[in-house]
Image (tube, rainbow, N blue to C red):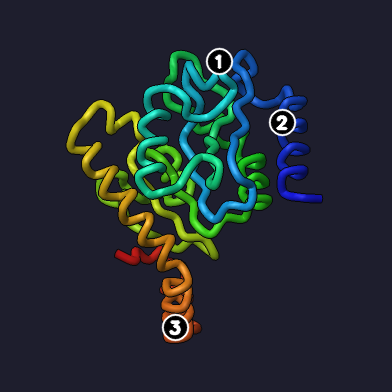
Amino acid sequence: MSKKEELNKLEKKMAKDDSLPLQESNLVFGEGDPETDILFIGEGPGFYEDRAERPFVGRAGQLLDKLIKGNDWSRENIYITNILKRRPPNNRDPLPEEIEAYKPYLKLQIRIINPKIIVPLGRFAMNYFLPDAKISRDQGKAFWLKDKLIFPIYHPAAGLRNSSVLDSTWESFEKLKKVVEKYDELVEEREIKRKETEGNKETEKKEQSLF
């Protein structure tokens, strides 16, 4: 079964799962290239996403498109999804129990796509992977988590509200492009560090920033 077929199967399973919260909203599963190396993950759909049943199609999505194109990429060669697959009422923050409910499906989605780099957009998506991270401090940095590079960036909506955040977001996308280009080199560096710290379990547990 291809990745596309596996994702389609997972989406159908989610659509039938009435135990998931936020049933009053439409399912926004995700879209893009299942064979991508780069997976973008936001916190949840908004008003326009709920209506279109597609991720990031409102004003924040339009900015994300510009940021992606600025790196000479397109929606067609990356993948975009959210932690929550349905819109919370009035675009409120996701609740812990909602995140927990959708977690098994997100884990399967990530496992199927199997990207090299995961880009959480905003603090809720970032804290899913890096619970102790702070968005203002850690966005624009790369962290190893098991065999994935996690590269958190401000949510595009934050850039629409604050010009300095927008500047930082553009800078972070420039860094992200370099991380993608240097990925193989970063893997080699990590393997060297692993051998140097072999047996040191405390060191292995730390999520080490590369920049």
Q: Is residue 202 visible?
A: no
Q: Quadrant of residue 91?
A: top left
**Residue 88 percent location from the top left of the image:** 51, 20
Residue under circle 3?
192
Q: Is residue 82 visible?
A: yes
Q: Identify the residue at the far front of this view.
A: 72
Residue under circle 1?
51
Which numbered disc, 1 or 2, marks the residue closer to the eye?
Answer: 1
Q: Is residue 5 left or right of residue 74?
A: right
Earlier residue among tags 1 and 2: 2
> Is 82 rendered above or below residue 15?
below
Residue depicted at x 43% and y 22%: 58
Residue under circle 2?
14
Q: Secondary structure at mark 3?
A: helix
Q: Identify the residue at the far left of this view.
A: 164
Instruction: Residue type at mark 2: give it.
Output: Met
Earlier residue among tags 3 and 2: 2
Q: Secondary structure at mark 2?
A: helix
Instruction: Residue type at mark 1: give it.
Output: Arg
The quadrant in which the C terminus is found is bottom left
Earlier residue among tags 3 and 1: 1
Q: Residues within 10 Å of mark 2 (few under 14, many from 20)?
A: some
